Amino acid sequence: MRGHLTYRSGNPVLNKNTFLTSHIESDKMTINGTINKTFISLILLITSGYFCFTSISPTIIIVSGIVGFIIAIVTIYKKEWAPTTVPIYALLEGCLLGGISFIYNEQYDGIVSNAIFLTVGILLSLLFAYKSGWIKPTENFKLGVAAATGGIFIVYLINMIMGFFGNQMGIMNTNNSSILSIGFSLFVIVIASSNLVLDFDFIEEASEKGAPKYMEWYGAFGLLVTLIWLYLEILRFLAKLYGRR
């Protein structure tokens, strides 16, 4: 067993207070249990996304995104509710991603399937590298990824505020196919992928420490958040590349 837990992850839903819960419960969190919960969540997300992959009303996409965000906040502050809130979150985010994916696919045929394959490929490759010991999340690695993640979300926030005034940062615009814009998207993908490694390590340490059973769902929630972020950034990256054709 590891001697200590750093509890550091670039993922905003996994922080040092996440697993500070009672360890008296007889049913504890396990890695296999978290994998199973993650698989169930992904099935729900993919199923919902498949049925929403159509020219649905933008209102449905917006509502799914807003309600999904609210459910995510509730899950963060009421982790014991995760067995109920995470499946709901997966369904809502699936509908949101299905609508967004449809919009991208209308502009660039085949981009969605490529983005899905790349996302799954990155997930499996990093999981294999982590389990094989090829990637070791050292303390400096964790600090670097956490800092980069925070910086990226500041850029997102600035871009969102600019959007209220009808503007957008050039590097965030999918129609901007400059080297700088593509480079930024590639950087974000690298950081999002690095967060997966931190999530793997975080869940492994928490399981060894004996976190409550319901935290398996919360661990799945953390992975789901990172995967959704990674998929959306890959879509953005591919759209910029396709725009250079």
Image (cartoon, grey):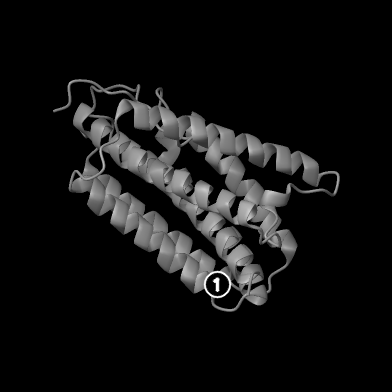
Q: Residue at x 22, y 45 (%)?
A: 134
Left-right relation of 38 to 145: left
Q: Position of residue 142 (x, y in %)?
A: 37, 31
Q: Note whether 99 is above or below 73 in the view shown.
A: below
Q: Position of residue 129 (x, y in %)?
A: 24, 50
- In the image as oriented, which residue stretches furthest toward the left? 1
Left-right relation of 43 to 50: left
Q: Nearer the viewer, residue 57 or 22?
A: 57
Q: Note whether 52 is above or below 125 in the view shown.
A: below
Q: Residues within 10 Å of mark 1 (few under 14, many from 20)?
A: many
Left-right relation of 212 to 221: left
Q: Residue at x 51, y 36 (%)?
A: 149
Number of on-image labels: 1
Give the amino acid at mark 1. Answer: Ile
Q: Nearer the viewer, residue 55 or 108?
A: 108
- In the image as oriented, which residue stretches furthest toward the bottom? 109
Q: Residue at x 23, y 53 (%)?
A: 128
Give the quarter of the figure containing the C terminus: bottom right
Q: Secondary structure at mark 1?
A: helix
Q: Position of residue 242 (x, y in %)?
A: 60, 71
Residue topped by disc 1: 111
Q: Position of residue 155 (x, y in %)?
A: 65, 38
